[in-house]
Structure formats: C-alpha cells, structure tokens
Image: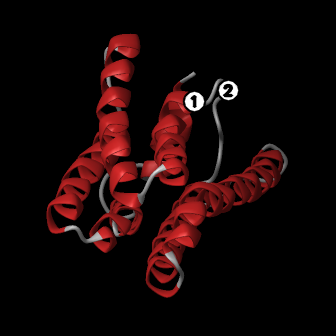
Amino acid sequence: MQALIDFLPVVAFVVAYWLTDFQTAIAVIMAAMVLQVAITWLLTGTVSRMTLSSAALVVVLGGVSLLLKNDLVFKWKPTILNWAFAAVFLGSQFIGERTIVQRLLQSVAKEQITLAPRDWRTLNLMWVVFFLVSGAANIIVAYRFPEHVWVNFKLFGLLGLTVVFVLLQAAWLSRREAGAGTNPPRSD
C-alpha cells in the first residue's frame, strides 16, 4: 500500500503534464506530495525521512519554479535528492556501527539478512554509485532533451533504473547470503 502511495504523486505529475502543461503539473505534484505526507501520517502515524525530504524539495523547488516561471529549477529535484542520498549513504560508511543500507534492510526484512561487514559496506557503496548515476542521468536528460522526454524519463526512466538496480542487488544479496552459511566469516 505504501509503495502505491509513494508512486501516486509522480503519476499525478505525468498525467497532469500530458493533459495540461508543465507549470500545472508542478502545482499538481506539489499538492499530491502534501496529500501523500498527510495520508501516510494518518495511516501509519509516521512519515519516513525520505518521503519528507522528497516532499520538501518538491514544494520548495516547485514553488521557486512556479514563481520564476523556470521549469529547470524543478527538474533539479531528482538530482538534488539522489545526490543527497548518495552523500548520506557514503557518510554512513564512516559514521556508526552499521551502514544505512544495513539498517534499512535489517529493519524491513522479515528474516534477518546475514552478511559479512565487508559485504554490507560494498552493498552500501553500490547504493552510493546508483544515487550518483541516477542524479547525473536526470540532469543530463533535463538539459539535453526536450521537456516531454524529461517528463517520461522521470516516470519510466528513473523507475526503470531503480527496478533494474534492485533486481541486480537482490541477485547479488542472494549469492552473498547463500555463501554466508557455507563459508567461514571474513574478518574485516
């Protein structure tokens, strides 16, 4: 259910763009993000930092974009968010006992995921690279391609990149975890 609620603002943005124009689509996603935060709060009593960060960026950059009538300001949102996540994930390599990806996966997994410390750091760095590449891809498309291409890339391209990355990560994790029980633990 939460995945659907998280995805709806982007769908609302794209549909509004297809039916009207970019400025209206920005206003629609701003309203949809505020609604998403409210619905999530009502259903769960909490809202993730990721959702709050994304909503704040949409509202701030969307507002600036509408005020200045400069669509490019809004197009920076996925890049800023992805690069901020890359910085946080990279910082977690050096701060705390566990990386962000380890904390996230161990908190949502039904079964405990067991990896060597080195593998957790590798997985965390994979996410850093993914966020850097996603942010760079977004800004390249925003500057080098027509507006309609960027809108479709925001919905299909970034989602597609994420799905492919998560599937590759799952395959990598299953190989690592399957080997964890048969191989002696690594000392890192």
Relative side of 186 to 84, left or right: right
Does residue 188 appear anywhere in the picture? no
Front-lying residue, 108 or 40: 40
The picture quadrant where one finds residue 71 is: bottom left
Label located before the other in sequence (1 or 2): 1
Relative side of 157 to 104, left or right: right
Where residue 88 appears, x then y in whole percent? 33, 60
What residue is pinned by disc 1? Answer: 4
Q: Which quadrant of the rendered structure holds the N terminus?
A: top right
Q: Which amino acid, by three-letter code, is at mark 1?
A: Leu
Describe the element under mark 1 as helix, strand or loop.
helix
Relative side of 157 to 60, left or right: right
Where residue 164 appears, x then y in whole percent? 73, 59
Front-lying residue, 94 or 31: 31
The picture quadrant where one finds residue 36 is: top left
Q: How is the image coloured?
A: secondary structure
Give how far apart the Cα atoms at labels 1 and 2 are. 24 Å
What residue is pinned by disc 2? Answer: 111
The picture quadrant where one finds residue 154 is: bottom right
Does residue 27 appear anywhere in the picture? yes
Front-lying residue, 181 or 121: 121
Front-lying residue, 128 or 180: 128
Residue at 53% across / 50% down in the picture?
14
Where residue 7 appears, x then y in whole percent? 53, 38
Residue at 32% across / 52% down in the picture?
96
In the figure, 138 relative to 38: above or below?
A: below
In the figure, 122 relative to 155: above or below?
A: below
